[in-house]
Amino acid sequence: MLTIQRVNPLEVAESLKSLFATESAALAAVVDRAYPDYARTGGASWVGVDSAGHVQLNVTLVPHEYDFRGRTVRAGMLANEVAGKNYRWFFPAVSLVKQLVRDVSREVDVDFLCADPQPTAAAVSKAAGLDELGAMDRFVIPLTDVRRPCAIAARAYSTALRLRFGLGAARCTIVDATEYDLERFGSP
């Protein structure tokens, strides 16, 4: 039996890292690297806690603000849907996401929820009441890697793209923060 609750992810950080480590060390590192910012900006985690007090299910709400037609809209991005080995089945995950949706629906801090789930988690999102309204695309280019062969391959790839499209290397300019014109980012 799991107890589903909303928590500040920093209060259960060690249990989250233990759960995330079952997926990958990189995911576990996200707790230390990104979760303090999530918590500081209003993010939270919905967790399923077992009778021993260990987090067995997690979905994190990450706040984002977007400029839409001249006004700011607030999104809650669902991230890091992770289930412990004994809880990797449909109904516990659906219950967790449904509780998140109920809780967030009562608040005025979020205008909409969005998610970019893995295919297996997409069924959970749909069963919890989320509808697919559109798709968000991500554009990525590998720049480097800590493993030397992968770093060389990433740099060769980005160089080949620049040569193919006739683009020069990116330039870096250092500007004092007190002199930077923030109005450049006033609209997307």
Image (cartoon, helix red, strand yellow):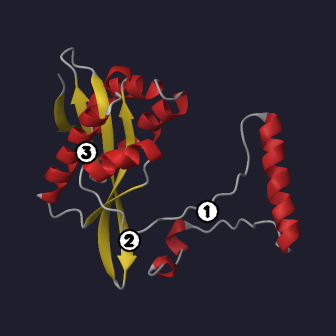
Query: What SS does tag 1 mark?
Result: loop
Q: Amino acid at mark 1?
A: Phe
Of the numbered discs 2 and 3, the one sitting upstream in the chain is: 2
Pointer 1 residue = 139
In this rendering, would 182 be left or right of 8?
Answer: right
Q: Nearer the viewer, mark 2 or mark 1?
A: 1
In percent of width and height, residue 65 lies at: 35, 66
In percent of width and height, residue 59 lies at: 32, 41
Q: Amino acid at mark 3?
A: Val
Q: Nearer the viewer, residue 11 or 66?
A: 66
Pointer 2 residue = 66
Query: What SS does tag 2 mark?
Result: strand
Question: Which residue sits at x=21%, y=19%?
Answer: 53
Residue projecting furthest to the left: 106
Callout 3: few (<14), some (14-19), or many (20+) C-alpha neighbours within 10 Å? many
Of the numbered discs 1 and 3, the one sitting upstream in the chain is: 3
In the image, residue 43 sits, relative to residue 180, either above or below, namely above
Pointer 3 residue = 97
Q: Amino acid at mark 2?
A: Tyr
Of the numbered discs 2 and 1, the one sitting upstream in the chain is: 2
Q: CA distance from mark 2 to mark 3?
A: 23 Å
In percent of width and height, residue 188 lies at: 48, 78
Are the residues tagged 2 and 1 within 8 Å (C-beta)? no
Residue 77 in view in this figure: yes
Count of labels in the image: 3
